[in-house]
Amino acid sequence: MRSNKQNIVQLTLSYIVIIAMITIILYPILWIIGSSLNPGNSLSGSSIIPSDATFEHYQELFDLEKSNYLLWYWNTIKICLLTMAISVALVCMTAYSFSRFRFYGRKNGLMTFLILQMIPNFAALIAIYALANLTNLLDTHLALILVYTGGAIPMNTYLMKGYLDTIPKELDESARIDGAGNFRVFWQIVLPLAKPMIAVVSLFTFITPFTDFILARILLRTEEKFTLAVGLYELIADQFGNEFTLFAAGSVLIALPISILFLSLQKYFVSGLTAGGTKG
């Protein structure tokens, strides 16, 4: 009897915690959606469920004569996809090297990656700006892609290496007996088995350019080169021309690519994040 009461209490507390977390997560999302449907530019009279909802802010975002939103969206998608592709390729090859080969400086290299992942990119803003200016990459998307890619390698290599260590090396040896070289083992044996962690790394490296504001604001100078974070900031940066409801509409649409990618790769995430924490 006492055990049943304890189970009921624990279940009740679990539901309370779950409901509280859902409320904390959904409340600001519902507010931003409601604000995007409110008429006018101010948030002072906005409500979470507007009585006179309108989609005029979304229409304005897609009007090429009034807004550069679609251009900013394309810039961001391009940077995200290129960063993701380059980062995943470099991380997979680097992690494979650390996992399968023994060479001079291997342990020091892993320790260096561990230290580098503790230092955020914005801690080196002055150095990044000076280097971009010196190499004539200031106000270019290439500069952002290189910085994002370089910042993604240490942490994700450590995660990927931990996952590759869980793949039996006997599979590599069997393939080599059949005449496979290192690249073929990597491409046909290891990568297919590493899909869960590849999905995790892909999502992480795709999200970073979407959520980053500081680096993009420092390196990008012209409005046509802005990413979504910088472009939307400009909508509310003016002292007298703030467009908060338009900003809210643009913020809602940002979630679409990330949600699509997350849902597409969802089946890989649980096993990838769990196994990636294992170190060999």
Image: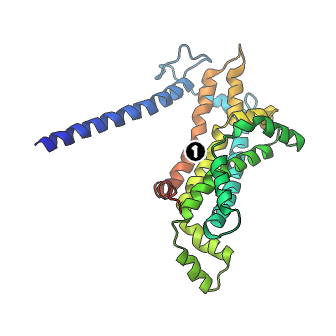
Q: Residue at x 64, y 54 (%)?
A: 111
Tell me the crowding category of disc 1: few under 14, some 14 to 19, or many 20 or more residues within 10 angstroms, Cα based: some
Q: Quadrant of residue 157?
A: bottom right
Whether residue 256 is visible to the viewer of this picture, yes or no, is: yes
Of residues 240 and 24, the one nearer the viewer is: 24
- Identify the image quadrant of residue 199: bottom right
Rendering coords of residue 276 (x, y %): 52, 57
Side of 99 where 278 appears, left or right: left
Q: Report the front residue among 266 and 187.
A: 187
Q: Is residue 72 visible to the viewer in this orientation of the structure?
A: no
User: From the viewer's perspective, is residue 251 above or below residue 245?
Assistant: below
Q: Is residue 140 left or right of residue 272?
A: right
Q: Is residue 67 left or right of residue 174?
A: right
List x then y, in percent, for residue 180.
65, 81
Q: Position of residue 63 (x, y in %)?
A: 70, 32
- Residue under label 1: 258
**In the foreground, 130 or 40:** 130
Where is residue 116 drawn, in percent x and y? 67, 47
> What element does badge 1 sit on?
helix
